[in-house]
Amino acid sequence: MQEIWIPESLIILFLFIHIIRPTIKKFRDIDGLAWLPLLSLLLTITLFPAYGFRPEVIPLLLFAAVLTPLSIIKQGKVSIKYRGFRKVKFVSALPPLIFLAATTWIAFYFTPQKDTALGTVGVHTQRLKSGATEERNQTEYSIRVYIDENDSQPSRRPLLILLSPALGSHSAVDMVSQELRNRGFTVLAVSERLKASPAKLFRRINAYFSGTVSAGANARGRVLEEERKEDILFLLSWIKQNPRLEGKGLLFDLASRDMIFLAGYNTGGSALVLLENTLSQETQLRGLIAVESPLWSLYREEEYIRAALSVDAGWYESVRYGINNWFMGIKPKKITGLGPLPKFSTPILFMVSGRSLEPKFREGRYLALFKTLEAARPYALLASVDNTSPLDYTDFPIKHPIITTLYSGGRKPVVNNLEAPSLTAAIITRFAADILKTESMTSSRLVDSPLPAGVRITRQP
């Protein structure tokens, strides 16, 4: 990934020349240098389609975006010439040089240290289409099956069906899936191939930030959870048919039919929790893993209590009553509590960020999750890791280390960014191994390992 340093260095060089131009007489007479900020801006923009979303480059992009119009305006005022300008002292260039140095440090320091391309070794890819319904158009899924090609008895390996997060899709969990495969699973990772529309992206963002306080945002989150339910039921119907993977054979020749685990991120995890009773009847389900799952469908909105209008009320009271009811009807509703909690017959693992243990988050965004955990039977675990963000159970700490750094506020993480996918896989493997041992099933394929300090496991009951 460090090959991105080449275009970044060129961009920084152009900006540096522009900044010091007024201080050097020979540079002041070169008219074309006035367009270097614009060229830098265009080059910076091209980094995103070339290398994907790079948050560490955003400060450099903003700096170039500020310098570009200033350069064009200043150049126009002097008739596109610097000739005749008074000599500018170098000290005047220090503030922009300091900003350039800061953006340069951010861009270089937070460059991923590891190749972030999707893995190909031992990975089978396949596409799958669902039928269209009245509520939803045809959906196309991208499926990646992670197989240990050196295993002589792959049918003894537990099958982990992993619903990728909407943000990042396969690229967000590719390294996690590889780690899980290395620990003894056959992993079937699923994501939607269609990109989210701006409207759907707005619903996700709005639900994420306000889904536990605003009834409108909560309703948008419920829609997303319902869509994921449909995805899960369709995928399970396909898996039950023991599909043939092109060039690899039947699915249950590559994984155990009797040891199936389902894991989902965000709304995918919520859908698993809400469908648990159905899922346990449809498959040989041994456990569920819900990662940072909001459970929006468990929240309930406030109800307005309207006083009855007396039969002998005059016209004035009737009008006022109607106006009050109209205003109450259009007033945005809030979330005031939780509805009935789901009951479980399958062991479940909730994985949440370190902030979930803080009172304001425990009683806010994670309220439904903790209440569900308290009511869960027969076996439920809550795993939280100190100084982690909601994205740290994915590949994001490796691919976007600046996000993890900003979230932690400088606090030391439990593991370094390069080990984040391995830590996620270790927590899931520990959960699965315990379940299989409890049920006296073969779990020798799973490579369990001790968890580092800072990983908090809460068991219920």
Image: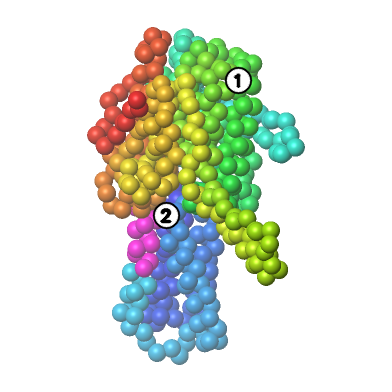
In the image, residue 377 lies at what x, y percent? Answer: 42, 24
The kind of secondary structure the magenta stretch mainly shows is helix
Residue placed under numbered mark 1 in the picture: 239
Local secondary structure at mark 1: helix
Point 61% across, 37% down: residue:
226
In the image, residue 448 lies at what x, y percent? Answer: 33, 21
Question: Closer to the N terminus: mark 2 or mark 1?
Answer: 2
Q: Amino acid at mark 1?
A: Ile
Q: What number is the disc on residue 339? A: none
**Disc 2 to disc 1, how far (Cα)?**
40 Å
- Tell me where residue 366 sits by quadrant: top left
Local secondary structure at mark 2: helix
Q: Which residues are magenta?
A: 99-109
Left or right: 106 as drawn, with respect to 205: left
Q: Amino acid at mark 2?
A: Glu
Colour pattern of the rendering: rainbow
Q: Is residue 117 above or below residue 53?
A: above
Question: Of 289 and 102, which appears nearest the observer?
Answer: 289
Q: Is residue 27 visible?
A: yes
Left or right: 239 as drawn, with respect to 450: right
Q: Residues within 10 Å of mark 2 (few under 14, many from 20)?
A: many
Q: Is residue 402 above or below residue 129?
A: below
Residue placed under numbered mark 2 in the picture: 56
Q: Which residue lies most toward the front here?
A: 312
Say whether residue 355 is magenta.
no
